[in-house]
Amino acid sequence: MKKDFDEKSLAQKLVSEIDRLTKPLGRKIRFMEVCGTHTVSIFRAGLRQMLPPQIELVSGPGCPVCVTPDDYMDKAIAYAREPDTIIATFGDMLKVPGSSSSLADAMAAGADIRIVYSPLDSLKIAKENPEKSVIFLAVGFETTAPTAAATVITAMRQGIKNFFALSAQKLIPPAMRMLLDDERTNVDGFLLPGHVAVVTGSDEFLFLPRDYGKPGVVAGFEAMEILRAVYRLAKMTASREPGIENEYDSVVTAGGNKAAQKMLYEVYEPIDTQWRGLGVIAQSGLRLRHEYAGFDIERVRPIEVDDAPGKEKSLCRCGEVLRGLTVPVECPLFARACTPEHAVGPCMVSVEGVCAAHYKYGGGTFQYGK
Ligand code: SF4
């Protein structure tokens, strides 16, 4: 009880400090939370409504499912339909729409698709089914890529020949650069992704103040941690002294997890890759290096897919939402044709998707920015 009271009182103090710091600027101040888990925490705690009216929090491209393009899903579905093939995937990929269907549709039609909780689970499936090809759908950011890399290394060491990966793993900093290079992006600072920073370290984001004059704060996921990070951003914005600060220093260091970084780059190399709604971003994807190419299903067994979006899907504005250029309620399909039960776009499928968060916590009528 006392803790709740103390936190409420501290939260009120932080909000009034944020107001005091930013009101004299006489304009809207926009901070982007890059990470989908932050988006959900912000909505769940009602932080947007709590902040002064001049502060806007906008969501960025940090939900891995949301930025996975149609053609990746189409390939996953096409592989799933092949005989003697098992797809191993995290559960949130099942309903992600491809051009015209989903893995859930393929599963209903008889494809062998198994839900895994770690990439290493797919090795167990491969060992238990030596006559079949097991394809792990490697989707995620720096947070999960080291574990996927460890799985590939283990498969090589154990001589597992029927395990493969279909990689759509991505790196966050190149996407942030791309957003800032786009003159339409209007963001004053970034709430930096805590989980990604555990691996990369906070120094990975020094390019923000150095190259773009923008501040960033690595934040944890509790409401108070996020609020303190917004306060720090407000302070740097008001003083016009951008830097990178770490509000999650219980787990994030300046240099990050060196062992995880070593494993990641031993197995993967950066390549240009497609992000849903953002286009191709230079050096933002991860591909298995030549030494591990035997585990890359696209190189071992290439597959062609036809990417032709349906009419309803072409109205999806997920790409603009992920750039912080619009909000879900501006999408003509939001809460009408597109709901979590019938998701048209990926931003509504994932629990970390901004459309799903608006729908769940905003009751379908959330007013952005007040
Ligand atoms: S509400 Fe649905 S259709 Fe609209 S942008 Fe979000 S995911 Fe796309």
Image (spheres, rainbow, N blue to C red):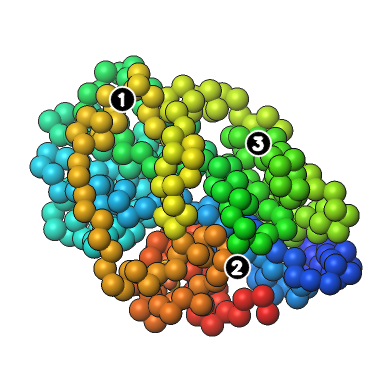
Q: Amino acid at mark 3?
A: Glu
Residue 44 at least partly seen: no
CB-based contact (under 8 Å), mark 1 and mark 3: no
Q: Secondary structure at mark 3?
A: helix
Residue 101 at least partly seen: yes
Q: Quadrant of residue 260?
A: top right
Quadrant containing ligand 1: bottom left
Q: Secondary structure at mark 1?
A: helix
- The residue mark sitting in front, 1 or 2, is 1
Q: Residues within 10 Å of mark 3 (few under 14, many from 20)?
A: some
Tell me the quadrant of the picture where the C terminus can be found.
bottom right
- Is 138 left, or right, of 370 in this rendering? left
Q: Secondary structure at mark 2?
A: helix
Q: Position of residue 184 (x, y in %)?
A: 60, 62
CB-based contact (under 8 Å), mark 3 and mark 2: no
Q: Amino acid at mark 2?
A: Phe
User: Cα distance, mark 1 to mark 3?
Assistant: 28 Å
Q: Quadrant of residue 335?
A: bottom left
Tell me the quadrant of the picture where the N terminus can be found.
bottom right
Q: Position of residue 202 (x, y in %)?
A: 69, 38
**Farthest residue in the front direction?**
183
Determine which of the numbered discs, if any, sits on residue 293 in the image: 1
Q: Which residue in the protein does label 2 denote?
A: 43
Q: Position of residue 199 (x, y in %)?
A: 59, 35
Q: Residue at x 43, y 28 (%)?
A: 268
Lower sequence index among marks 1 and 3: 3
Compare residues 38 and 122 and report the one nearer the observer. 38
- Is 69 left, or right, of 281 in this rendering? left
Q: Which residue in the protein does label 3 denote?
A: 204
Q: Residues within 10 Å of mark 1 (few under 14, many from 20)?
A: some
